[in-house]
C-alpha cells in the first residue's frame, strides 16, 4: 500500500506547484538585475559595424534598452509606439537587435516605419542578451542616469504600459 501512496503524494504535490505556476502572469518575471549595474558589453552597431555600441552609452541620462528582432511578431506591435515616443523625445531609446541577421533587421526597420533607436547594438549570437537575462523578445529595460537597471518589461511596450508603468518611473528617475 505504501508503495502506491508515495507516488500519489508526490503527484499531488507536483500538481499543486503546477497549478500555482499556471496562475502567475509570465510577464511578471522578476529580473535579478533590477537595482544592479547594466551588464558590460561592447557590440558592433547594426548600421555601422565598424562603430561600437557599449554599456557606457547607457550612463548619464535615463534611457530604455529595447531588445527586438525582425522575426518577432510582438515587436511589430510595439514598433509604431516606439516610433511615436522617439518623435516626442520622451526618453532616449536604445536598441539591442537579438539573434537576428543584420540585413533582415535593417530591412525590417525600413519596412515597419523607421528607426526609433538612438543606437542599436547587433547581438547576432545572443550572448549580450543572455547576460541581460533576456529569454524572449521584445523586452525593455529602464536604466537610470548611473547605468543601473530599474525595471524590466517583458512583452510589447504599448501606450497603456507606457502611461501606467514606464512614464511614471522615467519621470521619477529624471527628477532624482
Image: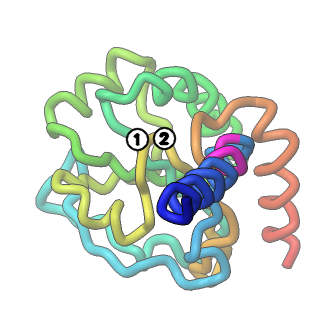
**Residue 145 seen in render:** yes
Q: Does the segment drawn in magenta span residue 64?
A: no
71 up-or-down from 151: above or below: above
Residues rendered magenta in the picture: 18-22
Residue drawn at x 16%, y 39% as measured from the top left: 102
Quadrant in which the C terminus appears: bottom right
Rendering coords of residue 113 (x, y %): 44, 19
- Which residue occupies the foreground of this view, 71 or 107? 71
What element does badge 1 sit on? strand
Q: CA distance from mark 2 to mark 1?
A: 5 Å
Rendering coords of residue 136 (x, y %): 42, 45
- Which residue occupies the foreground of this view, 15 or 46? 15
Rendering coords of residue 63 (x, y %): 61, 61
Query: Splitting the image into 4 quarters, where does residue 60 fall?
Result: bottom right
Residue drawn at x 49%, y 37% as measured from the top left: 116
What element does badge 2 sit on? loop
- In this picture, residue 47 sits left or right of residue 4: left
Q: What's the colour scheme? A: rainbow
Query: Splitting the image into 4 quarters, where does residue 84 fall?
Result: top right
Quadrant in which the N terminus appears: bottom right
- Which residue occupies the foreground of this view, 12 or 89? 12
17 up-or-down from 117: above or below: below
Residue drawn at x 49%, y 77% as measured from the top left: 38
Of the residues under marks 2 and 1, which one precedes in the sequence? 1
Circles 2, 1 touching at the beta carbon (< 8 Å): yes
Answer few, some or many: residues within 10 Å of disc 1's Cα (few below 14, many 20 plus, some between 14 and 19): many
Residue drawn at x 82%, y 49% as measured from the top left: 165
Mark carried by residue 138: 2
Q: Which residue is mark 1?
A: 68
Rendering coords of residue 70 (x, y %): 31, 29
- In this picture, residue 104 sits left or right of residue 12: left
Amino acid at each position: 500500500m505504501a508503495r502506491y501512496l508515495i507516488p500519489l503524494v508526490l503527484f499531488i504535490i507536483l500538481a499543486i506547484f503546477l497549478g500555482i505556476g499556471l496562475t502567475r502572469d509570465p510577464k511578471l518575471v522578476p529580473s535579478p538585475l533590477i537595482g544592479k549595474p547594466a551588464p558590460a558589453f561592447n557590440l558592433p552597431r547594426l548600421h555601422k559595424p565598424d562603430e561600437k555600441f557599449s554599456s557606457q552609452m547607457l550612463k548619464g541620462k535615463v534611457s530604455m534598452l529595447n531588445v527586438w528582432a525582425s522575426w518577432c511578431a510582438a515587436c511589430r506591435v510595439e514598433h509604431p509606439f516606439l516610433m511615436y515616443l522617439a518623435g516626442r523625445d520622451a526618453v532616449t531609446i536604445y536598441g539591442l537587435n537579438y539573434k537576428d541577421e543584420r540585413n533582415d533587421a535593417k530591412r525590417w526597420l525600413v519596412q515597419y516605419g523607421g528607426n526609433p533607436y538612438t543606437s542599436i547594438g547587433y547581438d547576432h549570437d545572443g550572448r549580450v542578451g543572455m547576460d541581460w537575462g533576456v529569454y524572449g523578445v521584445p523586452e525593455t529595460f529602464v536604466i537610470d542616469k548611473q547605468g543601473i537597471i530599474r525595471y524590466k518589461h517583458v512583452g510589447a511596450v504599448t501606450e497603456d504600459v507606457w502611461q501606467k508603468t514606464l512614464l511614471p518611473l522615467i519621470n521619477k528617475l529624471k527628477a532624482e
